[in-house]
Image (cartoon, rainbow, N blue to C red):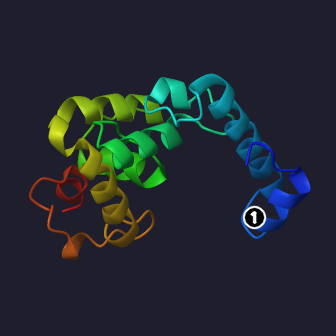
């Protein structure tokens, strides 16, 4: 991929969102992995974030899924659900603040799984507009449910 031409790679990924930027980032990432990491994908959040197109959320996903590191990727579902349920304080108003509180409050050996639990809960039960509180198994612990009753 580090030797790919933009037009060749673009043709392979043109159906996904933002293919121009992703093409540029993929080629840049591959070149940097070769030049800076001897061709091996780094496995720390800090090192991954030096790669083009890789932000904190992506770095946390990679390290938690591939190596089960206790890192928490905070997307919109994780952000909303963790604040709504009361897993983090209402003072946690940024993804980084939510990430730090979740990592502090969830047992280390479960952090890499909790990310997926929160995403799925946010997609199917604790939805943004119409949460399905009556179907939720977390009613007893949920601050939102307790307030709405």
The quarter of the displayed image where residue 60 is located: top left
Residue at x-position 57% and y-position 29%: 49
The quarter of the displayed image where residue 73 is located: top left
Quarter of the image with the C terminus is bottom left
- Residue 74 visible somewhere in the drawing: no
Residue at x-position 46% and y-position 36%: 95
- The picture places residue 87, in percent across and down from the top left corner, at 23, 42
Element at badge 1? helix
- Residue 9 visible somewhere in the drawing: yes
What residue did someone put label 1 on? 13
Is 4 on the left or on the right of 149, as rendered?
Answer: right
Is 73 on the left or on the right of 8, as rendered?
Answer: left
- The picture places residue 140, in percent across and down from the top left corner, at 9, 58
Q: Residue lying at the far right in this picture: please name it.
A: 7
Relative to residue 76, is residue 136 depicted above or below? below
Residue at x-position 52% and y-position 25%: 47
- The picture places residue 20, in percent across and down from the top left corner, at 84, 53
Between residue 135 and residue 108, name the one nearer to us: 108
Q: Residue lying at the far left in this picture: please name it.
A: 140
Residue at x-position 43% and y-position 45%: 61
Relative to residue 49, is residue 59 depicted above or below? below
Dot 1: within a 10 Å radius of its alpha carbon, few (fewer than 14), some, or many (20 or more) residues? some
Number of numbered callouts drawn = 1
- The picture places residue 2, in percent across and down from the top left corner, at 75, 42
Between residue 38 and residue 147, name the one nearer to us: 38
Between residue 74 and residue 83, name the one nearer to us: 74
Relative to residue 141, is residue 56 depicted above or below? above
């Amino acid at each position: 991929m580090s030797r790919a031409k933009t037009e060749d790679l673009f043709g392979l990924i043109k159906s996904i969102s933002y293919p121009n930027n992703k093409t540029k980032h993929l080629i840049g990432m591959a070149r940097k992995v070769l030049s800076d990491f001897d061709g091996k994908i780094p496995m720390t959040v800090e090192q991954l974030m030096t790669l083009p197109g890789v932000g904190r959320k992506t770095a946390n996903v990679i390290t938690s899924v591939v190596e089960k590191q206790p890192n928490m990727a905070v997307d919109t579902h994780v952000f909303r659900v963790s604040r709504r349920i009361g897993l983090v304080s209402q003072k946690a108003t940024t993804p980084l603040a939510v990430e730090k509180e979740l990592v502090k409050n969830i047992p280390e050996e479960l952090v890499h799984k909790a990310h997926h639990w929160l995403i799925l809960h946010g997609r199917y039960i604790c939805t943004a507009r119409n949460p399905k509180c009556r179907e939720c198994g977390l009613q007893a612990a949920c601050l939102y449910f307790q307030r709405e009753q």
